[in-house]
């Protein structure tokens, strides 16, 4: 067993984990972060995407011990004070899900995409989501949701508040 210390959704955890434990299973089974979905266990689908130190990663491709000393944001850590993150709200508003299985990973990847490119066009959104698979929607509403969130997350799109004064890197880290 190896002792790790991680900050997950703003809470510090110190746990002993087996060296072979994947981050996705640590998050789900040890911490109860079941919004991080196990899709394929091969890093092909992206359903397990989380933010590790502000960047999206597929948590089924990383051992928990590799995250030692890191800050992790899961889908559960995005909402603040009862308000959905703008990307979560855009997915809701644009009906960007059907079964919802891929949605947490799509949202986490989309937030990271906007951190790199705050004003993407449709093609850039499609390219930015390539590693995340949806088996239900055909992607059109997902792309529409990301474009909608990009517009709403621009500083001029909202009143001066915490969300509008953040730098893109802070947004990419899940709004922390």
Image (cartoon, grey):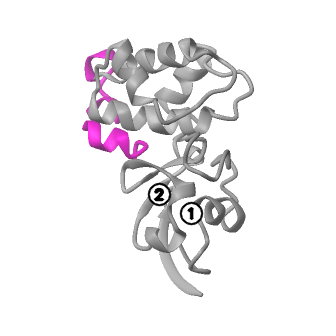
Q: Which residues are magenta?
A: 155-176
Determine whether, in the image, residue 111 is placed left or right of residue 32: left
Asked if 155 appears above or below 163 in the picture, the reply is above
Which quadrant does the N terminus fall into?
Answer: bottom right
Determine whether, in the image, residue 97 is placed left or right of residue 74: right
Q: Are marks 2 and 1 in contact (CB under 8 Å)?
A: yes
Q: Is residue 120 visible?
A: yes
What's the residue at 54%, 33% (across, down)?
106
Asked if 110 appears above or below 136 in the picture, the reply is below
Check disc 1: other Cα within 10 Å, few if <14, some if 14-19, many if 20+: many
Q: Is residue 158 visible?
A: no
- Assign a secondary structure to mark 2: strand
Q: Quadrant of residue 148?
A: top left
- Assign a secondary structure to mark 1: helix
The image's mark for residue 102 is none
Determine whether, in the image, residue 82 is placed left or right of residue 30: left
* Residue highlighted by disc 1: 23
Label located before the other in sequence (2 or 1): 1
Q: Quadrant of residue 2?
A: bottom right
Closest to the observer, 118 or 17: 17
């Amino acid at each position: 067993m190896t002792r790790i210390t991680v900050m997950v959704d703003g809470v510090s955890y110190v746990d002993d984990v087996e060296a072979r434990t994947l981050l996705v299973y640590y998050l789900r089974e040890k911490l109860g972060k079941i919004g991080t979905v196990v899709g394929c266990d091969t890093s092909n689908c992206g359903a397990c995407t989380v933010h590790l130190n502000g960047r999206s990663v597929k948590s089924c491709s990383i051992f928990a011990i590799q995250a030692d000393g890191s800050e992790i944001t899961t889908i559960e850590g995005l909402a603040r004070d009862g308000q959905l993150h703008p990307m979560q709200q855009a997915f809701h508003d644009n009906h960007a899900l059907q079964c919802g299985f891929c949605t947490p990973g799509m949202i986490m990847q989309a937030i990271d995409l906007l951190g790199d490119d705050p004003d993407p066009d449709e093609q850039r959104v499609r390219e930015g989501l390539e590693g995340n698979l949806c088996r239900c929607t055909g992607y059109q509403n997902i792309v529409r949701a990301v474009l909608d969130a990009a517009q709403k997350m621009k500083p001029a799109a909202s009143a001066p508040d915490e969300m509008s004064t953040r730098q893109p890197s802070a947004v990419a880290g899940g709004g922390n």
